[in-house]
Image (cartoon, grey):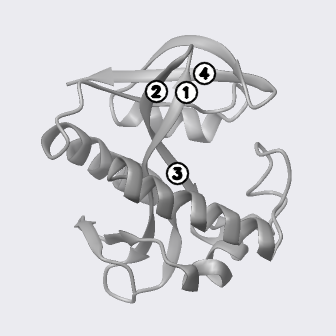
């Protein structure tokens, strides 16, 4: 098991490990959950995602964390702070991706709010962003619920992406 990073009323966030492939496949193999990503991912691509995340932990001290239900330990999704390039500089993004069976319960907002607090209080970040697809209204709503405002639209990952941001 990965190290627990933070907890909220209902959630525990921990570091991702190579044992999370099956958990993540529940999201990555779902075309609906992956609608705003280039495509679904197979096991090999999921392993690459985990390696990318573990490298982010090493290089930046942050990355996507596994979100579990605090009481049951059930896998709910991933949420964390991820370095992203925006207009030539590295910004810290709150990213979130949850299994479809858990949508609509407020878990993404709860996890994202905890990551925002962690970013400002523990990491002393000056600014945090979120990068939802321009058409991904539910994802944009999470950014808005944690106090972020739209700054601009950029072209990234071959599509139009909103840049939401909040400063400390």
- Give the foreground label among 3 and 1: 1
Instruction: Point out the tag, 2 or 4, that comes first from the N-terminus.
Output: 2
Q: Residue 85 — which label? A: 1
10 Å crowding of disc 1: few (<14), some (14-19), many (20+): few
Residue at mark 3 to residue at mark 1: CA–CA distance: 17 Å
The reply to whether callout 3 and callout 1 are in contact (CB within 8 Å) is no
- Give the foreground label among 1 and 4: 1
Answer with left or right where residue 128 lies relative to residue 105. Answer: left
Residue assigned mark 2:
90
Q: Please, is residue 49 above or below residue 138 in the view?
A: below
SS at badge 2 = strand
Residue at mark 1 to residue at mark 4: CA–CA distance: 13 Å
| Count of picture labels | 4
Front residue (pair 137, 133) = 133
Residue at mark 2 to residue at mark 3: CA–CA distance: 18 Å
Residue 15 percent coordinates (x, y): 39, 70
> For residue 144, which quarter of the picture?
top left
Instruction: Point out the tag, 1 or 2, that comes first from the N-terminus.
Output: 1
Residue at mark 2 to residue at mark 4: CA–CA distance: 16 Å
Instruction: Point out the tag, 1 or 4, that comes first from the N-terminus.
Output: 1
10 Å crowding of disc 2: few (<14), some (14-19), many (20+): few
- Give the foreground label among 2 and 3: 2
Answer with left or right where residue 161 lies relative to residue 146. Answer: right
Residue assigned mark 3:
96
Q: Please, is residue 9 above or below residue 3 in the view?
A: above
Residue assigned mark 4:
162
Instruction: Point out the tag, 2 or 3, that comes first from the N-terminus.
Output: 2
């Amino acid at each position: 098991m990965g190290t627990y990073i933070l907890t909220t009323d209902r959630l525990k966030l921990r570091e991702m490990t190579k044992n999370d492939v099956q958990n993540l496949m529940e999201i990555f193999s779902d075309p609906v959950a992956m609608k705003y990503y280039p495509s679904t991912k197979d096991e090999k691509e999921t392993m690459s995602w985990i390696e990318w995340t573990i490298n982010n932990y090493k290089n930046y001290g942050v990355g996507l964390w596994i979100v579990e239900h605090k009481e049951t330990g059930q896998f709910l999704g991933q949420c964390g702070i991820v370095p992203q390039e925006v207009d030539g500089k590295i910004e810290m993004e709150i990213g979130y991706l949850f299994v479809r069976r858990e949508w609509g319960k407020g878990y993404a907002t709860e996890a994202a709010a905890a990551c925002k607090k962690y970013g400002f209080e523990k990491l002393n970040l000056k600014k945090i962003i979120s990068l939802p697809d321009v058409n991904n209204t539910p994802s944009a709503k999470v950014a808005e619920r944690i106090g972020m405002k739209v700054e601009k639209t950029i072209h990234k990952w071959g599509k139009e992406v909103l840049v939401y941001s909040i400063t400390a």
